[in-house]
Image (tube, rainbow, N blue to C red):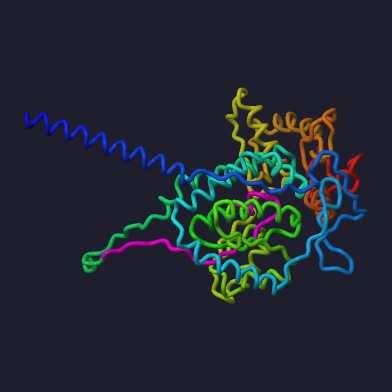
Amino acid sequence: MERLEDFNLLVLGAIGTATLFCLYLLLKKDYEAPVSYNVTPPTQIQPGWQGGILEEPTLKVAGSSAIQCYAPATGAALGRVNPSTPDGIDRAIAKAKEAQVEWAKTTFAQRRKVLQTMLKFVLENQETIARVACLDSGKTMVDASLGEILVTAEKLKWTIDHGEEALKPERRPTNFLMMYKWNEVIWQPLGVVAACVSWNYPFHNLISPIIAALFSGNAIIVKGSEATAWSSGYFSSIATSALVACGHSPDLVQSVVCWPNVANHLTSHPDIAHITFIGSRPVAHHVCASAAKALIPVCVELGGKDPAIILDDLSASNFKRVASILMRGTFQSAGQNCIGLERVIALPTVYQKLIDHLTPLIRALRPGSILNTSPSDPPIDVGASISSANFTNLEFLIQDAVSHGARLLAGGKRYAHPDFPQGS
């Protein structure tokens, strides 16, 4: 009889524990549930919008320090942005530094809620975000969907699911003489960090460091490229509005855009604890030299010269799939892609087969602006270059290669679009 009573008590205890645990999970899920919020999108992405076409599209404005923003695919003026000054950068850092004191005290659950809220907004507004990215950088909607929306949503999801585990204290082994010691690595917020990001992924490159900074308890100053200054304000407001919706200070995220001569003020600022840089190798040298003045650690992500190597044993069943990968890897974002293909090394058996298959596909590519076509127009395959400033040099490189024995099978000079002559 006593054993039966003990068993019943055990069962009741297990049921009670399970009930409490389920209640905890429900409350936890509700506490971290995303909050809905709105960010007004730019009017320029609305169907039918027509901006004035710049005769010679350029970021510089005669007699002014303002940044002239324009759509690379069409040359349409998007507006002007006043660049940050050294004093403006100081104020932004001061605001972030003050806000970070309270943010560092937040729990991982509170930070997850902010990221859940951002993720909900990105998924519900992905077409709008993609259109803004397309208009400011010249890429196609397919490029924006893959390179802006998908990867950002994935980073948000990974950080939500695994961020806390990644930042847990870690034990470290010791030696015999130090056996009485307890070694542990504890991850603590740095304070105010900075990210100087490139223009080729105007949404993902800007939001990605914000995700990491916020979840690790930091505030962040994001310096977007002057080439995509127009979209930086909208994209950064997605993060600040998520913070406000969850009851936190929007000052944790500061967006600045400035000319290169002012950027040194940010990258050498003594209140910046870490810098992430995405861009070219030459500019990275300047950033690292500037950061060294204040002993600021820098993490750089630079370009590459990525090859695709096609072996002789390529089967007929895989041939078209490989060719499709080569086309995508080469022409995504008009080739302005740090992980894009710059070289194809094909072994003798498949070399000519690839040439014969790829040449008509390349010649048939349709450049243009995805945002300025009607439903009856053929789809656009390739977006624009961010600027025409480098075209002369590119044409020289092609002609130089031809003069040294290369065969020119398609293109070879800048494309003059019949509908968008000022586009690049």
Q: Please say if 359 is above or below 246.
A: above
Q: 168 or 358: nearer the eye? A: 168
Expressed as whole percent of the image width and height from the top left, the position of residue 220 reads 58, 62
Expressed as whole percent of the image width and height from the top left, the position of residue 216 reads 48, 58
Q: Please say if 112 is above or below 253.
A: above
Q: 23 or 201: nearer the eye? A: 23
The residue range painted magenta reads: 182-209
Task: Give left or right: position of 269 versus 88.
Answer: left
Task: Give left or right: position of 328 versus 423.
Answer: left
- For the N terminus, the quadrant is top left
Q: 117 or 382: nearer the eye? A: 117
Task: Give left or right: position of 75 versus 248.
Answer: right
The quadrant where residue 121 appears: top right
Q: Residue at x 65, y 73 (%)?
A: 90
Q: Furthest-top residue in view?
A: 317
Expressed as whole percent of the image width and height from the top left, the position of residue 364 reads 81, 32
Q: Please say if 311 is above or below 184.
A: above
Q: Is residue 384 magenta?
A: no
